[in-house]
Image (cartoon, grey):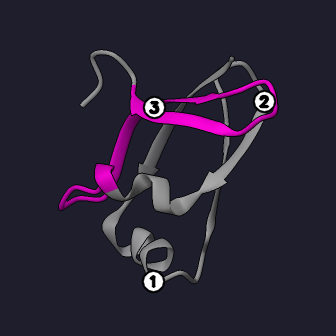
Amino acid sequence: MNRYEFQLHIPTEKYVDYYRGRIRQVIVRSTGGQTVQFPASLLLKFVAPDGIHGAFVLTSDENNKIVALERAAGAR
């Protein structure tokens, strides 16, 4: 399993582009320095009135298939 930790700060007005499908992929730099890309649809469950903010962990299998996207322990 691969584990990527990263921070996200996407204000509501910016997330609208993801929600409407104008932007379909999110690209982030993990705390380990790797560039990670995943479908924006995975973020839907984390949208709050002020957007999406906090620390997250993306887990993928040996073939880089996404297993889970979760808030990091202790994150908002």
Q: Which mark is residue 20?
A: 1
Residue type (three-letter) at the residue carrying disc 3: Phe
Query: Looking at the picture, does residue 24 appear above or below residue 37?
Result: below
Q: Are marks 1 and 2 in contact (CB under 8 Å)?
A: no
Q: Residue at x 70, y 27 (%)?
A: 61
Residues in magenta? Answer: 45-71
Residue linked to disc 2: 34
Residue 47 or 1: which is nearer the viewer?
A: 1
**What is the spatial separation of the Cα atoms under label 1 and label 3, in whole angstroms?**
22 Å
* Disc nearer the start of the sequence (3/2): 2
Q: How many labels were placed on the picture?
A: 3
Q: Secondary structure at mark 1?
A: loop
Query: Looking at the picture, does residue 16 appear above or below residue 69?
Result: below
Residue linked to disc 3: 56
Mark 1 Cα shell of 10 Å, populated few (<14), some (14-19), many (≥20): few
Residue type (three-letter) at the residue carrying disc 2: Gln
